[in-house]
Image (cartoon, helix red, strand yellow):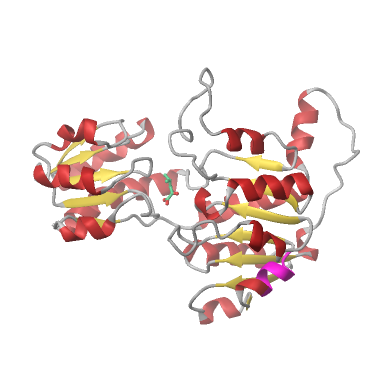
Amino acid sequence: MKICAYEVRNDERKDFRELEQRLGVKIELHSQVPETGNAEFVKGCEGVTILGQGDINAKLLDCWKEKGVRYLSTRTVGMNHIDVEHAKSIGIQVCNASYPPSGVAEFTLMLMLMCLRNYKQALWRGQVNDFSLDGLMGMELGELTVGVVGTGRIGFAVIRLLSSFGCRILAYNRTEKESIRKYAEYVDLDTLYAKSDIITLHVPLTENTYHMINGESLKKMKDGVVIINCARGELAENDALIEGIESGKIGALGLDVVEDETGITHVDHRIDILSNQKMAYLRQFRNVVMTPHMAFYTETAVRNMVRCGVQGILYMA
Ligand code: COI
């Protein structure tokens, strides 16, 4: 079996090479994001493994199929970048990765605390020897109500961490889980919006969840609500976030992901003109903490992502 790996970062190479030895597969490593222009990379490969920056549409899948690809694994949990239905219809099997949810959950808590304690502003001031306290007074998590949207593996891990802070935890999910009730109270989405001081998103990006944070949903929330997004940028409409920050409706934003981040995150753009105006505008507010889609990025997660990427193909074959 020969596998073509796209979007390979330097920190993944060692794990790929180890798996190659251990599992007796040949893996060709490419740093490029998959697109039709580099589809020839898959020549002679039955399996392809990718990360999340490409647009894996019908055209690209057809191209790969023609070249003999039968299995596609994404080393990400999210699969919103792949036209899975089309892949199935042309006989390409698809799988995603699974890695411990603790890394993203811990990062989520970090963003929440940074927002509550005005830490971005404190950090900026400290860099210029301004150690004043004016405007830095924070809020204590234990006194607040946190709404967790999505109680899958990551949402559950966030809830468990939150439970040690003593805050009230509300949860929303299409299907409710008994194990969550020990820590959180399930409510409908409108109640969660209305009662939460902090709202954190942990749902996949689908047609139903696209732009779930918009002008209308914001109106249902408390004034000064803190919103955390470590899931997918497109869950929240940039225009609504900007409007919310400018009007003060949103008290703070902790964004590890942002709408239209593809091609920007995970790339050094220091000497480029950024293509996403709204992202650049949002980033500069004192109460918007923005990180480059790195909540997943721990040694444990990366090891698991590479393993799933390779083993997933072998299981499907
Ligand atoms: C995921 O696993 O879904 C992530 O968000 C990770 C990232 C490399 C796309």
Q: Position of residue 311 (x, y in %)?
A: 23, 53
Q: For the magenta stretch, what is the residue range? A: 191-196
Identify the residue shown where x is 53% and y is 27%. 274
In the rendered image, which quarter is residue 195 located in? Answer: bottom right
Q: Position of residue 143 (x, y in %)?
A: 80, 65
Identify the residue shown where x is 54% and y is 64%. 155
Residue 40's place in the image compared with 63, above or below, is above
Q: Position of residue 212 (x, y in %)?
A: 56, 60
Identify the residue shown where x is 11% and y is 36%. 43
Please state which of residues 160 and 232 is positioned toward the viewer in this rendering.
232
Identify the residue shown where x is 18% and y is 52%. 71
In the rendered image, which quarter is residue 140 located in? Answer: bottom right
Magenta run includes residue 57: no
Magenta run includes residue 192: yes
Please state which of residues 2 and 199 is positioned toward the viewer in this rendering.
199
Query: Is 46 on the left or on the right of 159, as rendered?
Result: left
Query: Is 105 on the left or on the right of 83, as rendered?
Result: right
